[in-house]
Amino acid sequence: MSKQVFTQKELEKYADTLIWGLKTARPSIKKYDTVLIKCDIAGVELGEVVHAKLVKQRYNVIFRLTSSPVIEKDFFMYSDSTQRKFIAAGEKELSDGLGGYIAIHAPESLTHLKDIDTKRQSEVAIARKCLRDIMNKNEEKGRFGWTLCTYPTEELARNAKLSLKAYSRQIAKACFLNEPNPAKKWAWLYKESTGIKKWLKSLNIDQWLIQSKSTDLKIKIGDKRKFLGVSGHNIPSFEIFTSPDCRDTEGVYFANQPSFRGGNYVEGIRLEFKKGKAVKISAKKGQDYVRKILATDKGASMVGEISLTDKRFSKIDKFMANTLFDENFGGKNGNCHLAVGDSYSDTYSGDVSKMNKKIKEKLGFNSSSIHWDLVNTEDKIVKAVLKNGKTITIYEKGMFKH
């Protein structure tokens, strides 16, 4: 178990912020809707506070602890293919019946799966994609919403090369737990980000051109797209993103920030895209793992998301060894992150409830059992090529030009 790192007052504020996130992600959520809290063991003290608040607000709450690192490793090590594809009775029904979902990540190990064959992990991801598809479809219909957060652990702090106290203070600062009313601060940020999203939408953008020391990428935004961010889904979240047309990405993208995924550590990922696919894949560390993950399925080597974070909003200025925080890094230059794999259908500017496979394919929304955010924190310039042929700078020195 992790040491207590937040005061009771901070725990209350963190829980209130998560509930704000859930209600912002799904404004139509109502009393007696079913909400699932999924919590790592080390984050249970926050989970307990969230649980109590949701019960008092008259939601039907299901609380589940996730598998320990030992249990998770044993499963992947000793299971056969049939077991890895197993979906328990009632899981599809549960996924379909959820009105809300709050995930509290508090990992006690980041590398316990490093010796596990990635094909075994991919089998599970592919088999369980049907559950995510159910929830995604319900979200498109306004029937489901979710949010997630990170709770500090010794393992996270050690891999970020910070003390547990310093790591915890980064979380408190990023989530506005030092504010008298964090939810009010998030509501202000929501309003500020809405202005940027509307501005980007009004430009009628055809392509983004992203250039930094190590990145030179052209990415087609696609038709019928909108920009999202600060939507309550992630706590914290400062990014502005969309899911582009995955069929037309050209050039080089470099992730200068390390990443932990599936029990593996990777560093210096370089992807060269041609006609939408990453045709050359390399990494300074973990190259074999990266190549295997990007071969999981047809969409794994294509782009599902492109995002920018404005340093004026994000107070995160340390590597956190945690994607939720690292993809929202502010620091000196802000950040860009690109996700390979599955796209977000709610970036569709039409009636999302009517989205189907045919529309997604026609508009170039990517489909995959993976979604992996790769972060670049280099100083960069992002230009937009508009559909009228004009080119303007939309992001420079870590800030939107809005």
Image: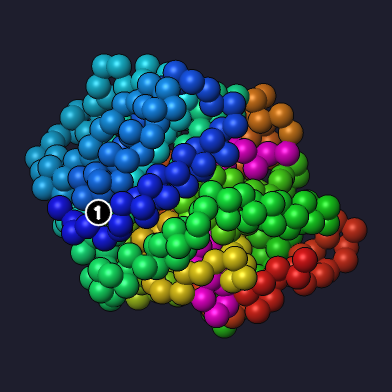
Residue 113 pos. (x, y %): 19, 54
Q: Is residue 133 left or right of residue 38?
A: right
**Is 183 situated above or below 93?**
below
Foreground residue among 287 and 223: 223
Let me know if residue 82 is in the magenta part: no
**Is 44 situated above or below 312?**
above
Foreground residue among 65 and 305: 65
Q: Residue at x 31, y 37 (%)?
A: 38
Badge 1 amino acid? Pro
Q: Is residue 351 left or right of residue 375?
A: right
Q: Is residue 317 left or right of residue 267?
A: right
Q: Which residues are magenta?
A: 328-349
Let me know if residue 348 is in the magenta part: yes
Which residue extends farthest bottom?
A: 213
Quadrant where the image shows the C terminus: bottom right
Res 372 → quadrant: bottom left
Q: Residue at x 51, y 33 (%)?
A: 145
Q: Residue at x 46, y 39 (%)?
A: 19
**Is 255 situated above or below 345?**
below
Residue 236 pos. (x, y %): 48, 55
Q: Which residue is mark 1?
A: 107
Foreground residue among 83 and 103: 103
Q: Residue at x 54, y 45 (%)?
A: 232
Q: Is residue 42 visible?
A: yes
Find numbered disc 1 in the image and state the secondary structure of the residue it sits on.
Answer: loop
Foreground residue among 58 and 200: 58
Residue 28 pos. (x, y %): 59, 26
Number of other residues with Cα within 10 Å of mark 1, as a class: few under 14, some 14 to 19, many 20 or more: many
